[in-house]
């Protein structure tokens, strides 16, 4: 959008690092220094999930796993959101109340309890695999499998039989990796569990299972878990090289971001890092519609003179000072980003920034950079950004927690931005 303005070259890929790196360091420092006082220590994470649907799943540390020799804490298994480590089965010796300093060994069986989303995250940790051998007897290729939840109905033909006796995998083409029963943590091995009506099973199965079993009398509910396909670690090197290549092309000015991104996407498909079907499903149409609508709204504000009117108000509030204009624009953009999408906030307020630069007779670059940083400062509300919502529930945070922590961080980022921007992009 900045490049579209006449006589303006725009910004290079890493230009924002001049502001972004200092802002990141300030935010990290403030968070570490003040979070213990500004955020309450809400303990008892496991108790909060007692009323939710919980699963107990057994994971195996593979031979040659990068986790071997690491402590529980160093391996990142200590504080998994929505998931906690109950015990370790080490060659038949049960280790309970596992210390975070306990070193992992090959063939350790780690018993976790947590919600379904956390089970998906656990399966994606490199070096861990589901301990149930039935998973590896499935006919479907690893890359085409996903997780599905089913609820056993009273018409299930194998009620009272154990999972092993009924041959669940052979009958349904699915492997049970966890069972939830009235919120209880079942201590029995999955093969020895006798299935009852109302039991919720977490299955690893082929992609056609939901379509085949959705209307089956055997299950009351059949629901596929979104984004539950296993991570393909063998392709990470190829994907990483493609990403680095895209960044290098854009950074060197060989290709614009749009063309470089299209080229990278095509290479990811051609090298089979991602399937076309999965790529199509990953498109967030709601986000695209919001951006498109925001562009239309921004254009309407410019054509009708609304952007000019708002710019005049901002210039008046800043008493005609360029620095005051940066402060006013940052505050307005951060306020917008707290309640609507940050992309929408940037698109809507961009015409205002351009009109303000023209009205005050200053260069548009410092205002555009301030707008970008302000739109990325979404700390003050849980609805400001997707990652805020991701930690809102599992962290047991309240709305006021975001205000207490987010407002000071926003002010700090604003101070750093207003101090640095004029030094790099003079008025």
Image (tube, rainbow, N blue to C red):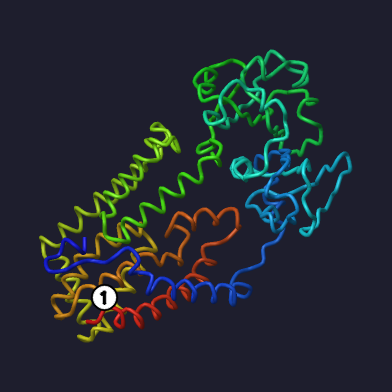
Q: Is the residue 230 above or below the residue 13 in the image?
A: above
328 or 254, nearer to the observer = 254
Q: Is residue 112 left or right of residue 414?
A: right
Residue 385, x across and y down, in percent: 43, 57
Q: Is the residue 96 above or below the residue 157 in the image?
A: below
Q: Is the residue 241 above or below the residue 156 in the image?
A: below
Q: Quadrant of residue 270?
A: top left
- Residue extending farthest right: 93
Q: Residue at x 44, y 37 (%)?
A: 274
239 or 322, nearer to the observer = 239
Label 1, residues with CA under 10 Å away: few <14, some 14-19, many ≥20: many
* Secondary structure state at the residue bearing disc 1: helix
Q: Quadrant of residue 425?
A: bottom left
Q: Residue at x 54, y 22 (%)?
A: 209
Q: Residue at x 57, y 26 (%)?
A: 221
Q: Quadrant of residue 216?
A: top right
417 or 7, nearer to the observer = 7
Residue 272, x across and y down, in percent: 44, 35
Residue 331, x across and y down, in percent: 34, 74
Label 1, on which residue? Answer: 366
Q: Is residue 351 left or right of residue 36?
A: left
**Screen quadrant of the C terminus:** bottom left
Residue 182, x across and y down, in percent: 72, 35
Q: Is residue 414 left or right of residue 126?
A: left
Q: Residue at x 32, y 67 (%)?
A: 372
Q: Is the residue 327 above or below the residue 187 in the image?
A: below
420 or 79, nearer to the observer = 420
């Amino acid at each position: 959008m900045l490049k579209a303005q006449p006589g303006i070259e725009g910004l290079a890929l890493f230009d924002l690092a001049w502001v972004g790196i200092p802002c990141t360091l300030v935010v990290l420092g403030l968070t570490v220094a003040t979070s213990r006082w500004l955020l309450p220590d809400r303990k008892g994470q496991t108790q909060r999930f007692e009323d939710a649907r919980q699963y107990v799943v057994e994971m195996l540390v593979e031979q040659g796993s990068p986790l071997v020799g690491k402590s529980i804490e160093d391996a990142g298994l200590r504080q998994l959101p929505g998931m906690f480590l109950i015990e370790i089965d080490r060659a038949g010796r049960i280790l309970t109340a596992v210390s975070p300093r306990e070193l992992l060994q090959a063939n350790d069986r780690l018993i976790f309890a947590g919600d379904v989303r956390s089970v998906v995250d656990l399966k994606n940790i490199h070096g861990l695999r589901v301990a149930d051998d039935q998973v590896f007897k499935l006919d479907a290729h690893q890359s085409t499998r996903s997780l599905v939840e089913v609820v056993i109905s009273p018409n299930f033909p194998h009620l009272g039989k154990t999972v092993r006796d009924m041959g669940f995998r052979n009958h349904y083409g699915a492997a049970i990796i966890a069972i939830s029963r009235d919120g209880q943590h079942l201590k029995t091995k999955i093969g020895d569990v006798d299935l009852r009506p109302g039991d919720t099973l977490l299955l690893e199965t082929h992609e056609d299972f939901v379509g085949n079993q959705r209307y089956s009398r055997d299950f009351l509910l059949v629901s596929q878990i979104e984004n539950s396909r296993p991570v393909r670690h063998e392709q990470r090197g190829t994907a990483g090289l493609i990403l680095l290549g895209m960044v290098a092309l854009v950074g060197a000015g060989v290709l614009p971001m749009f063309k470089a991104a299209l080229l990278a996407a095509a290479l990811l498909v051609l090298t089979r890092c991602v399937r076309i079907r999965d790529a199509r499903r990953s498109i967030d149409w709601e986000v695209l519609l919001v951006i498109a609508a925001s562009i239309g709204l921004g254009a309407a504000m410019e054509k009708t003179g609304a952007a000019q009117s708002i710019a005049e108000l901002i210039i008046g509030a800043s008493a005609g000072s360029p620095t005051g204009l940066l402060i006013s624009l940052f505050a307005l953009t951060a306020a917008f980003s707290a309640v609507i999408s940050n992309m929408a906030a940037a698109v809507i307020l961009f015409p205002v920034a351009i009109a303000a630069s023209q009205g005050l007779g200053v260069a548009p670059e410092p205002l555009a950079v301030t707008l970008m940083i302000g739109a990325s400062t979404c700390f003050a509300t849980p609805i400001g950004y997707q990652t805020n919502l991701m930690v809102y529930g599992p962290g047991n945070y309240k709305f006021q927690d975001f205000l207490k922590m987010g407002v000071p961080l926003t002010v700090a980022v604003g101070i750093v931005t207003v101090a640095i921007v004029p030094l790099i992009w003079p008025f």
